[in-house]
Amino acid sequence: MFKLALLLPLIVGTFGQTPTRCCYSHKFDGVLMEVGASLPLGSSTPTILDATNEISYDFDEKLMWLNRSQVNPVNGNRETIIILRRYHESKEYIVQNGQCYSQTINPDSLTPPCVPDSFHYGGSFTIGSGTNSVNVNNWRGNINGTTFAINVQASDCTPVSESLYGIIEQANTVMTYVFANLKPTLAHPDRFHQQAVCAHAIPIHGAGKRDLEEMIANIHSHLVPFIL
């Protein structure tokens, strides 16, 4: 959950007793908005990252679904892809332009929606003002050389925002995520069903879709540790 200069709510900080690390619901629907940039090492041309993800997540059943709308950094057009991860089957399905691709994933790579044990408390804050304010706890830490800051609601651990910066996949990267419309339920469990078009999914690594491979790898490397 991140804070960039373009996301500057009124924040009032308070510091006191360290709260207990917390977890959000193991099952939820919501929207994950992300914006940022990456600059490959040795390059002077950054790639702008701008995407909105509808998400359904079920940690207990080891399932995740993303409907991702993102700006193509080459042509500026907005593209949509659907990603279904069935961790219990070690499979991921990617649907783009009516075609389904698949690849093997690590079944143990799904993490619980919790503040990582290694993160340190960074203070409590009020975002917004008046009746529209939200009290959040800030947590900060480092994962594999990347620095993270997470804000969660103090009352129930609902994720609010997350930010990261560091070298990811050989690129200097900064990202901000904002969580919206989160509900601790699954209103659309059918999202986890394999689409009919994926009955004959094409292995992505043998499809000659290097651009799609790179895009999916980029999504994987930037997914927030709080939930993914």
Image (spheres, rainbow, N blue to C red):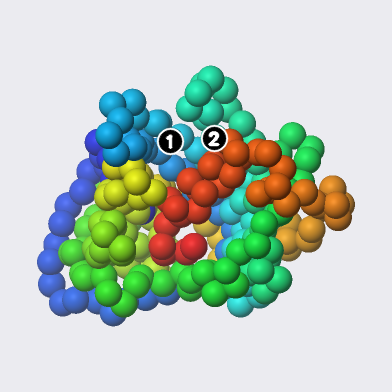
Q: Earlier in the sequence, mark 1 or mark 2?
A: 1
- Please tell me which residue lies in front, 40 or 17: 40
- Disc 2: which residue: 70
Residue located beneath label 1 in the image: 49
Callout 1 environment at 10 Å: few (<14), some (14 to 19), or many (20+)? many
Residue at the spot x=59%, y=44% of the render?
213
Where on the picture, by quarter, is residue 43? top left
The image position of residue 196, as x and y in percent, is: 87, 52
Element under disc 2? strand
Report crowding for label 2: few under 14, some 14 to 19, many 20 or more residues within 10 A (C-alpha): many
Q: Which amino acid does the dot numbered 2 rest on?
A: Gln
Question: 208 or 120, which lies in front?
Answer: 208
Residue 189 percent location from the top left of the image: 73, 63
State the image coordinates of residue 42 (x, y, percent, origin top left): 27, 34
Q: Position of residue 171 (x, y in %)?
A: 33, 42
160, 224: nearer the viewer: 224
